[in-house]
Image (cartoon, helix red, strand yellow):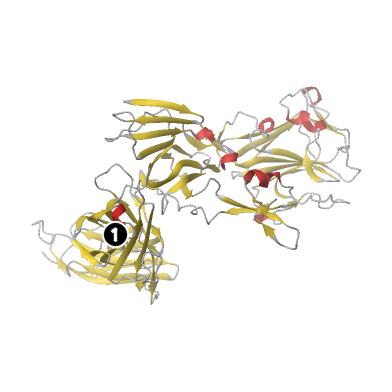
Amino acid sequence: MSRRLVLPLIALVFCATLTNVSHALTIYRIGGSDLPPPERDAPFDFIQLEWADIDAKQHGSTLLTEISTTLAPEQLDPTVNLTPLLDERGGKIETLRSIVGWADFPARDAPMFDGDPTTHFLGDGDWGGDYGAIENKVLVFDMGGLFNIDRVRFYPREKHLVDRFIQTVIVGINDGDPLKDGTREYLVGEGWRRRPPGARKDFEIVLNATENTRSDIVIEMPDRPIRNILFEAPANIRGVWEIAEFEIYGSGFAPQATYVSNVIDLGQPVSLGRLNWSVQEDEGAAIDLTMRSGDDSDPNTYWRKTFRGDETTRYSDGKALVLSTYNRLDKGERAGITPDTENWKTWSPPYDLALSSGDLAGNKPRQFVQFAVQFSSTSAAGGWLHYLQFEVSDPPVASQALAEIVPVEVSAGAVTQFTYKILPRLTGTDLGFDSIEIKTPARVASIDQVRLEGLPVDFTEVRVEENEFELRIPRMDLQRTNELLEVDFQAQVFQFGTVFAARIFDSQQPHEVHQGVTAGDADQLVDSNTLRVGLINIDKKAVNDLRLTSRSFTPNGDGVNDQLKIQYELLNLGAVPVAIDLYDLSGRRISELYHGTATSGRFAVTWDGRDAQAKLVPPGLYILRLEVESDGGIKSEQRVVSLVY
C-alpha cells in the first residue's frame, strides 16, 4: 500500500506492504515532482522536495536560474525590455551623486525606466543635488549577473524626436570582474574638475558620439557576456535632451547560473548512499553538481570584530553567532563568514554527470546535506537538471567506522602489499554489516587475507573489478563492536594522493545503503590515520611498463593471435593528451590506435593489423609509439612490432 502525507515544503510518501512497520531506507527527491515515486522491491519512505523551496534562512540561494519541476539557467526573451525588471531580477540602476558617490537613482530619473514612452527625464544640465560637482548625467545599469545583451536603445518622446535628441553620449560595458578594474579604457569622471568620492568605475567603450543627430539611438552590443552598462551624457551645447525610455534587450542563456539547495535535515545521523540524477546538456554547455554533508544545520562560521586591533570572535553576548544574529550586527561589526570545517565536510568534486549516479559524499553518518549546481552556458546552449534523488539508511550501518591504510607511501606503478584496517563502532539500533567494497586505482593483483582482532577469518571474493573489489566477511554486529578488521591485498598506485575509499553494508539487506568509512585512527599500533597514499622516488617518468602481448602477431583470421594487445601505465598525471600511433620503418604513420585524453592509471588498446583505410598491412616490422603531452613536456616510449602471416 502507499499513502502520502503533505508537510510544509515537503511531501512524504510511505511505500510499504504493511502498516506500522519501521524501515531503514529513505529516498529523497529534489525536483521532478511530476514523476511518480520510485519503485523498489522492498519497503521504503519517499520524501519529495521542490527546487522552489529555496530559503536563505536555510542557507539556500539561487542566481540566474529558472525554477519549475526542472532547474535551468535563465533564458532571456529578445523581445522583452529588461530595464524595468532589473530590481526584481536582482539588478539595480545607480547614478553618480557628489556627496555619496554612487547611489540608487532618484525619483526624477524614474521616467526613463517605467516602460511608459510618454513620460521623460529632461537632460537640462541640472542633475539634482550635486552642488555642481557632477558634470555629466551618469547611470550604470547592473544586470545582476552576466548576460548576453543584444542591444541598447534610448529615445525621446515622439513629439520631441526632432529637437530633443542627445548630441554627445558615451555608452560602455564591463563584465563586473574586479580583477580587471583599473585596466579598462574609460574611467568615469576622468578629466572632470572634481571627481566625486567612490566614483571609480571603468568600462570598455561601445559608443562615443560627439556630434550625434539621431533621436532614436540603437546600439548593437559585442558578442560577449555583460554585467554592467554605462550611460554618460553632458548637457547639449544647443537646447536640451530628453529620454523617454532607456531599453536593454538580451537573448540566450545566462552564461553562469547557480543554485544552492537548502540545508536538508535528514532527522538524525544516517548512512549516506547513492545519488541519482537526470540531466540534459546541449553541446557547448556544462553542469557542475557538488554536495557536502554535516553534523549541524549551519555549514558556516560567523565572525565579529572586537575592535581590539585585528581581533575577531565567533561570539556575541556570550553566544556563538548564527546566521540570524550575524545579520543583526552592524555592518562595521561583521568580520566575515567562513566554512565550518569542524562540523561539515567540504564541497565534493563535481560528479561525472555522464554517468547516471554516484555515491553521496560522506565519510560517516551525517544528519544534514546540501547540494550546489553551477550552469555554464553559451547564448544558444544550456543545460537542465530535472531532479536529484538520493538514498539514506536510518539507523545507519554503523555509528562509526574508522579506517586507515598502510603503507601510506609507495613507488609509482609498483605492485605493493597493503593492509586496510577498519574499526567499527556499533550501537543497539545499527544495522551491522558483512560486506566490504574497496576502491582501487586498478584491478588488484591479489587479495591475500582477512583478519579479525589479528586472527585470520574466512572470506569470499564476491567481485574483483578494474577499480573495485567486494568481500563477504563474518558478520560485524553489536557483539563485535570495536573489533579491528584487517584486509591484506596487493595493488598498484599511479597517482600521488590516491584515496582508497571503502563502503560497508549488509548483504542480507541489499536495498539498504552502502556506508562510507571515515579516515582515522583504526589501529593505535600504526601511525597512518589516512586512506590517502603518496608516492616516493617520484621522477619525471610519465609512461610506465609499456607492454605488448607478443612481439609478433598473425592477423590471418584464424582466431589465434589475431590481435595485438598494448598495455601501458601512466604515472602521476592529470588529464593529458595521449597518442598511440604505428609507423613503418621509413617513419610513415600507417595507423592511429588512440588519440584522446587520459589520467593516471592502467590502460590497454588493441591493433588488428589494419591501416587507417582498414586494410591489412604487409608483413614486416613496425614501430609502435606512445606519446604523452604533460606539463613537463612530451614523453614517449617505443616498441617494435612484428607482423607475420
Quarter occupied by residue 62: top right
Q: State whether residue 599 appears in this view.
A: no
Quarter occupied by residue 5: top left
Quarter placement of the N terminus: top left
Identify the residue at horizontal 67%, vertical 52% (top origin). Answer: 318
Residue 288: where, in percent of width, then height? 47, 47
Please tell me whether residue 231 is drawn above or below residue 577 in the rendered image.
above
Return the residue nearer the eye: 397 or 61.
397
Please tell me whether residue 502 is drawn above or below residue 7 in the rendered image.
below
Identify the residue at horizontal 39%, vertical 47% (top origin). Answer: 272
Identify the residue at horizontal 15%, vertical 68% (top origin). Answer: 552
Quarter placement of the C terminus: bottom left
Residue 286: where, in percent of width, then height? 46, 45
Please tell me whether residue 11 is drawn above or below residue 477 in the rendered image.
above
Is label 1 in a helix, a strand or a loop? strand
Residue that carries the numbered disc 1 in the rendered image: 592
Residue 450: where, in percent of width, then height? 24, 63
Tally of numbered tags:
1
Q: Horizontally, is 395 left or right of 284 in the view? A: left
Return the residue nearer the eye: 30 or 117.
30
Extreme left residue here? 558
Residue 106: where, in percent of width, then height? 81, 35
Q: State whether residue 386 appears in this view.
A: yes
Q: Amino acid at mark 1?
A: Glu
User: Badge 1: few (under 14), some or many (20 or more) residues near its Cα, within 10 Å?
Assistant: some
Extreme bottom residue here? 537
Q: Horizontally, is 235 left or right of 522 in the view? A: right
